[in-house]
Image (cartoon, rainbow, N blue to C red):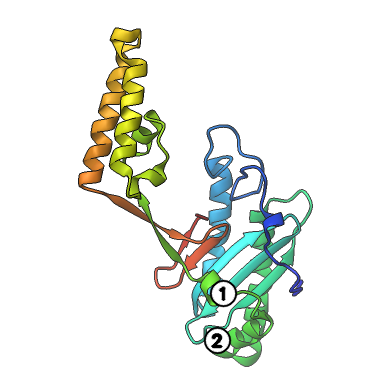
Amino acid sequence: MDSSNSIVRTKEDKRKHKTCVSCGGALPKRKQKYCSMDCRDKLLFALRWLTNLLQPLRTRYASFFFTGSKLIINLISYHSKESLTYYSNRTPGILPAKDLQNMILSLSRQWHNENERMNCRQLASISVLEKAHKGAASFDSIKLKTEKRISKVFKYMTCLKIPMTVLESESAHQTIKSAYRKEVMKHHPDHGGEDELFISIVQSYNEIMGWIKNPTYSARRGIRGMWSYDGDLQKWYPPM
C-alpha cells in the first residue's frame, strides 16, 4: 500500500477530453458519463465492497477517485473532522474497479487480522485508521455538496440558441424575447422556413417564459471529479 502524499489535483491533471468516470477511458459519442453500463456496474460493485469496510471504520463521508497511476480513498469519521487518505498504485492494463477491489481486500485483511489479534472491532478499526495519511485533503473537499440545477428547459433554450446562464440574469426577459424574435424572423414559413421548426421555436419560447414565471429546479448530490459516500445513507454518488 503506497502512502505517498504527492497526489495533488491541479488544472494540469484535468483531462482534456471527456472520459468515463468509471474507467477513465475515452467516452463514445453521445455517452455522458460511462462508456457502458457494464463498466459502471463493475465500479459500483467495488464501491459496495468498500462500504462494508467504511462501516466499521465509522465513516461519515468518503470520496474515491483515480489517476493514471494511483487510486485514492479519502474519508472523514464521525468522531473527527481530520481527513484520512489511503493510496494504492494502479496496475497497468487493469480497470480501476479491479484495482479498487484489491485495495479493499488489502485493507480488509488488515482489519480482520487486527480484530483476531485483539478481539476488539473498535481497536481493529483504530489500527487501520492509523495507517492512513492524515490531512491530505480538506474536510470541505470530502463532504458531499448539493447542487441546484435549472430543470425542464434546457432543450428549449438550445432551440432558441440561448445560454442557460441567461435564465437567472437581470436581462432574462429582454434577452429571451430578442432571441425569439430573431429565430421567428429567420424561420417563419412566410419567409421560407419549415413549419415544424417554427412551431418548435414558438413552443420553446412559451415554455421558457412559463419557467420564468414559475421556476423549477432539480437537486443533485456529489463532489466534482470524485465518487462520494454519505455514511448516514450508506450510499455512493457519481462525480458531478
Give the labeled residue for mark 2. Answer: 121
Quadrant of the rendered image containing residue 49:
bottom right
Give the structural element (helix, strand or loop) at label 2. helix
- Farthest residue to the right: give it: 92
Q: Which of 129 and 124 is in front in this view?
A: 129
Tell us which disc is closer to us: 2 or 1: 1
Q: Which residue is drawn at 59% across and 45% down?
A: 39
Disc 2: CA contacts within 10 A as few (<14), some (14-19) or many (>=20): some
Give the number of marks. 2
Q: Is residue 236 left or right of residue 212?
A: right
The kind of residue tagged 2 is Arg
User: As displayed, is residue 168 above or below residue 58?
Assistant: above
Disc 2 versus disc 1: distance between alpha carbons?
Answer: 18 Å
Q: Residue at x 66, y 89 (%)?
A: 117
Residue 175 visible in the shown view: yes
Q: Which of 60 and 217 is in front in this view?
A: 217
The kind of residue tagged 1 is Leu
Quadrant of the rendered image containing residue 183:
top left
**Residue 218: x, y in percent?**
33, 52
Give the structural element (helix, strand or loop) at label 1. strand
**Residue 194: x, y in percent?**
34, 11
Q: Is residue 173 left or right of residue 88?
A: left
Give the labeled residue for mark 1. Answer: 75
Q: Which residue is drawn at 28% across and 8% down?
A: 190
Disc 1: CA contacts within 10 A as few (<14), some (14-19) or many (>=20): many
Q: Residue at x 52, y 86 (%)?
A: 80
Quadrant of the rendered image containing residue 26:
top right
**Residue 84: x, y in percent?**
62, 78
